[in-house]
Amino acid sequence: MVEQAKAANVSNRCRAFLMTKRLIIALAGSAFASVAQTALCAPLLEATALYKDTAHECRTLDLKSWSHPTRKVLERSKIEIKKVELCNQDVYAIYTVRFNASPMLGVNDKYFNELYVEMAAANGFHSFALVDPGWGLIVTVDVKGKKEVSISYDEFDAPEAK
């Protein structure tokens, strides 16, 4: 009798494990489909509002000779700089970078908000954008004076993000 009870208990545990495993697989599949759908709907970087509406007449800087306070902020934050463009008569900067964490996750808000404020100050309180092809993400930082910064996020279709 005791052996039958133990066998039934093990059988119930296995059934519960399999149901949990199926639920996790279903949720993961759903999340993957959502991400895939977002990536399929996102425009290419060149077709985003950043390059169509905001930034004009951009020129790429030589990173080997580029020296600017924003470089120090990014390097201190351990953010890899891939490319820097100056646009709109050298007033609007676009930093193509590789973040070490997602700016979209709430747990990273404090880190990224401090980064944006520090970057704004180092950039002479001019608006700028951070582009991360790995995350397929554009972070637009609109600076309004020395005390107000607003952040917006845009996704784009990046081959690196897949």
Image (cartoon, grey):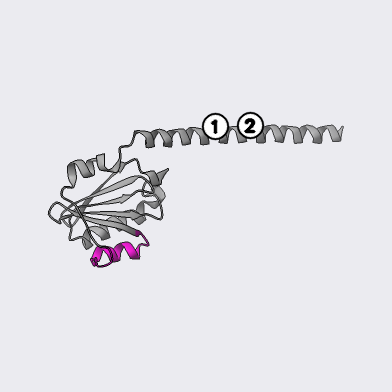
Task: Say above or below: 28 vs 142.
Answer: above
**Which image quarter is the N terminus in?**
top right
Residue 65 rendering spot, x and y as whole percentages? 25, 68
Residue type pointed to by label 1: Ala
Name which of mark 1 and mark 2 comes first in the sequence. 2
Near-viewer residue (13 or 54): 54
Q: CA distance from mark 1 to mark 2?
A: 10 Å
Q: Secondary structure at mark 1?
A: helix
Q: Label 2 neighbourhood size at 10 Å, few (<14), some (14-19), many (20+)?
A: few
Which segment is the magenta one?
A: 63-80
Near-viewer residue (98 or 152): 98
Q: Label 1 neighbourhood size at 10 Å, few (<14), some (14-19), many (20+)?
A: few
Which residue is outermost to the right?
1
Q: Secondary structure at mark 2?
A: helix
Please report the residue visible at 20 percent of the width from the left and 60 percent of the height from the top: 123
Mark linked to residue 26: 1
Residue 112 rendering spot, x and y as whole percentages? 33, 54
Is residue 74 part of the magenta span, yes or no? Answer: yes
Residue type pointed to by label 2: Met
Mark linked to residue 19: 2
